[in-house]
């Protein structure tokens, strides 16, 4: 005879994963639709071409010059995986961004849930996922398009899932007896979870892996983890208080994170020494002269991430969605305030680290020269998932108590929650319903293929995007103007092999059209002389010569 509850347990084991898979598939589809409503640029196109090179054997990206963020171990493997199925297509960018954001929503929900079960666990997860659920259309470029630090949050959240499972949730009163809250030996003195070297090794490997791709993980994870663990562990060890095992465990996490930061920072130089890609130096210039403007840009950027930038002009229906999204901002601010107020209290490690990470990320951005306009919001993209997780962890139980206590207030409280939830779902549906937008260079790529022009030059914003739009049937390399007014190779997200006259035979220059710099045509004439033929199409000016232009191209310039 089967023991009671066996059938129910098996049913749960089946329907819960099924529901999760269906939810992920639905979110992915909706995010893909929204991603396609914004035009991709040469930044994303360059990453797609780099992944294509890796997929075809150039694993170290030999001859490539990448930007100050390589995405070498994050988005590039993801793009290569998608390309192995879909081929070299512009929608690789949309598929990758949609996959990334779907993972972020699900990981935020899991991390917010933590060890909690039942109604509290579900409330935590739904609150975190709900805050992230529906990005506004204006945030599509940052959250749902080309790699822009958003994807870096995926391995960061995975790292924290490992840490969270390996650490006891100190002082979490929402947990049932027997789960790190019942006076057990683990709660009284041990660290709980996996305190073996394998736990530290996993953290070290994941953070090193992420640091190779994007050094912003220093701000969003490594420095906050080292700082908080050190401040929590050292006083207890010095005073020889209880929980020495836990203090040593947290110091070990800090050491693993610090070592990952050092090795990850050295990795690009090691890769270059092995003949791989060369990365542009990371520059973080600080400024206080325009702090008032930078503070305002930072404030707007945070609102934009959470879909609540009420200061941007929008159609009426989008304005309604934006105002409803202010609820998420309020929740995150409340959660951050509570977390900062409890930094000195013994509690689960995640809460103080996430609070410190948000503060450091926002403050660093506000004092940097990158806080010039709303486009710089990508530098603080990780604040969104961190804030959502923090809100789920800190506010789920108080909100449940509020609903239960306010019996009379349920007449307005629950309908209010319902309206806000409907607003988030409406935003998601509205954004997904927007018509898709092709690459801006799609007409140009088609014209070049039709006229047999398969190898040429253009400014950065038209080069790789044209190559991608043509499916690599047309290869266009980026050039820029040198101080002497002549054209030289552009050393940013480019392949040096594209300028080798023994490998390529470039015969045309795109010297007009959208986003093309005004100097392009004059610099082309100065460098290559008068063209044999000049075409005008769709606002573009295509200059054609009967010789290999790479033989006349100058030495690389400074970027």
Image (tube, grey):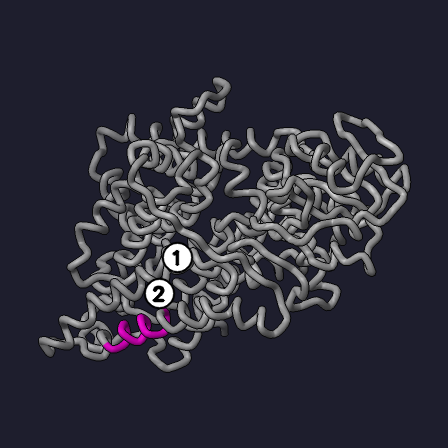
Residue found at x 80% / y 52%? 551
Residue matched to label 1: 111
| Nearest to the observer: residue 505 or residue 554 | 554
Residue bounds of the magenta highlight: 248-257
- Which residue is the extreme one toward the bottom? 197
Badge 1 density bin: few <14, some 14–19, many ≥20, Cα 10 Å: many
In terms of secondary structure, what is the magenta stretch mainly?
Answer: helix
Question: What residue is shown with label 2?
Answer: 164
Identify which residue is drawn at 67% across, 66% down. Answer: 62
In the rendered image, which quarter is residue 352 located in? bottom left
Residue 91 x/y as whole percent: 69, 45
Task: Name the outermost residue toward the top.
Answer: 316
Q: Residue at x 30, y 39 (%)?
A: 331
Could you tell me if the residues under marks 1 and 2 are in contact, i.e. CB atoms within 8 Å?
yes
Position of 264 with respect to 492 (left or right) is: left
**Cα–Cα span, label 1 and label 2:** 8 Å
Is residue 176 at least partly visible in the picture?
no
Q: Residue furthest toward the left?
A: 239
Query: Where does residue 254 sit, x and y in percent of width and height?
Result: 31, 70
Viewer can see residue 357: yes
Q: Nearer the viewer, residue 7 or 464?
A: 464
């Amino acid at each position: 005879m089967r023991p009671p509850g066996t059938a129910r347990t098996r049913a749960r084991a089946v329907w819960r994963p099924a529901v999760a898979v269906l939810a992920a598939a639905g979110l992915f589809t909706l995010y893909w639709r929204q991603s396609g409503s914004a035009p991709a640029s040469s930044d994303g196109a360059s990453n797609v071409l780099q992944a294509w090179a890796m997929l075809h054997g150039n694993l170290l990206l030999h001859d490539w010059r990448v930007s100050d963020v390589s995405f070498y171990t994050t988005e590039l493997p993801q793009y290569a995986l998608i390309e192995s199925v879909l081929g070299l297509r512009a929608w690789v960018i949309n598929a990758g961004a949609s996959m990334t954001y779907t993972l972020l929503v699900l990981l935020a929900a899991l991390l917010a849930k933590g060890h909690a079960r039942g109604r509290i666990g579900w409330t935590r997860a739904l609150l975190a996922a709900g805050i992230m659920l529906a990005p506004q259309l204006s945030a599509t470029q940052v959250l749902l398009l080309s790699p822009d630090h958003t994807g870096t949050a995926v391995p960061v959240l995975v790292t924290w899932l490992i840490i969270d499972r390996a650490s006891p949730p100190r002082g979490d009163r929402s947990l049932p007896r027997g789960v790190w809250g019942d006076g057990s030996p683990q709660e009284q003195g041990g660290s709980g979870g996996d305190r073996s070297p394998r736990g530290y090794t996993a953290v070290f490997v994941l953070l090193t892996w992420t640091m190779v791709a994007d050094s912003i993980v220093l701000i969003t994870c490594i420095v906050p983890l080292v700082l908080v663990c050190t401040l929590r562990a050292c006083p207890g060890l010095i005073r020889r208080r209880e929980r020495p095992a836990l203090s040593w465990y947290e110091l070990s996490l800090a050491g693993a994170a610090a070592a990952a930061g050092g090795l990850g920072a050295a990795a690009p130089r090691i890769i270059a020494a092995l003949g791989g890609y060369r990365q542009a130096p990371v520059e973080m210039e600080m400024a206080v002269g325009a702090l008032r403007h930078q503070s305002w840009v930072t404030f707007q950027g945070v609102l934009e991430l959470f879909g609540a930038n009420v200061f941007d002009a929008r159609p009426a229906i989008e304005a309604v969605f934006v105002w409803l999204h202010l609820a998420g901002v309020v929740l995150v601010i409340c959660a951050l305030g509570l977390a900062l107020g409890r930094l000195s209290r013994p509690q689960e490690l995640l809460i103080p680290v996430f609070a410190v990470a948000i503060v450091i990320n926002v403050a660093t951005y506000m004092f940097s020269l990158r806080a010039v306009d709303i486009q710089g919001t990508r530098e603080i993209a990780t604040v969104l998932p961190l804030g959502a997780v923090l809100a789920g962890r800190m506010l789920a139980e108080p909100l449940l108590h509020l609903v239960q206590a306010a019996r009379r207030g349920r007449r307005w409280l629950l309908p209010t929650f319902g309206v806000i939830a409907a607003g988030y779902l409406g935003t998601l549906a509205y954004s997904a319903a927007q018509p898709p937008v092709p690459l801006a260079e799609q007409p140009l790529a088609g014209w070049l293929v039709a006229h047999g022009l398969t190898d040429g030059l253009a400014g950065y914003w038209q080069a790789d995007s044209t190559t991608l739009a043509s499916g690599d049937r047309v290869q266009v390399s980026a050039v820029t103007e040198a101080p002497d007014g002549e054209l030289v190779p552009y050393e940013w997200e480019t392949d040096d092999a594209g300028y080798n006259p023994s490998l390529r035979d470039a015969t045309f220059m795109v010297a007009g059209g959208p986003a093309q710099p005004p100097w392009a045509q004059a610099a082309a004439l100065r460098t290559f002389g008068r063209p044999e033929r000049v075409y005008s199409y769709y606002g573009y000016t295509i200059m054609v010569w009967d010789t290999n232009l790479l033989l006349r191209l100058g030495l690389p310039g400074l970027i």
